[in-house]
Image (cartoon, grey):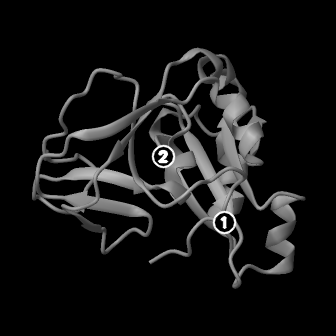
Amino acid sequence: MREPAPPYVGEGPHALWHASEDPSIERFEPHLSATASSSEPRVWAVDTRHLPLYWFPRECPRGTVWATPGTSAADSAFLRESSRVHLVEDGWLDAMRTTRVVAYRLAEETFAPDPEVGGYWLSREPVEPLELVDLGDLVERHARAGIELRAVENLWPDWDRVVSSTLEFSGIRLHNALPPP
């Protein structure tokens, strides 16, 4: 299991969340995910600490990176002065400012931690949201949280460096990134 991401400014208490571009979900039903290793239908959630991994339009390719106690000094230099860095291709910045993304807070009673991926939670039962939070301008949300949003022309040069390093990372929707240069 990976080391958790570091805290961010204004993180708030532990809660479970589901981020979406659909602000009208009244009930989350268990379903099969194309990327899950299990064939069992589930509802997925992420904890507060890892919610920033979803402060992006759904299809936006991104890499999120942070140091752990096992990260070498040379690899830590990639972060510069930041405790965590989110990489995004600069062609997605306009969408990050204009796409409406909401976060649904979910009751925790039916959820259990994902045994494979830290920060993720799974429920076998339907879940009704407790609260809906509009995330607003996602570029500004990163800035307020003290998370460096590093816009790059192409993700692959930095991503290749990250995955071969001692940094901890999560990559989402990378199949939507521009082709490697």
Name the residue located 69 percent from the left edge and 55 percent from the top edge. 8
Height in image: 116 above or below 132? below
- Residue 172 has which mark? 2
The front one of 70 and 138 is 138
Q: Is residue 23 left or right of residue 10?
A: left
| Badge number at residue 6 | 1
Residue at coordinates 50% horizontally, 74% vertically from top-left?
2
**How far is disc 1 from disc 2 in space, using C-alphas?**
18 Å
Nearer the viewer's eye, disc 1 or disc 2? 1
The residue lying at 59 percent from left, 18 percent from top is 95
Mark 2 surroundings within 10 Å by alpha-carbon count, few (fewer than 14), some (14 through 19), many (20 or more): some
| Horizontal arrangement in the rendering, residue 125 relative to residue 105 (left or right) | left
**Is residue 181 visible to us here?**
no
N-terminal of the two: label 1 or label 2? Answer: 1
For the C terminus, give its image quadrant.
Answer: top right
Identify the element where label 2 is drawn: strand
What residue sits 55% from the left and 30% below the top?
A: 135
**Element type where label 1 sits in the image:** loop
Q: Are marks 1 and 2 in contact (CB under 8 Å)?
A: no
Q: Amino acid at mark 1?
A: Pro
Q: Is 76 rendered above or below residue 158?
A: below
The relative height of residue 134 versus residue 145 in the rendered view (above or below) is above
- Mark 2: which amino acid? Ile
Residue 54 position in % (x across, y down): 50, 42
Quadrant occupied by the N terminus = bottom left
Residue 108 appears at what percent x and percent y? 28, 59
Residue 9 in the image: state x and y as whole percent.
72, 52
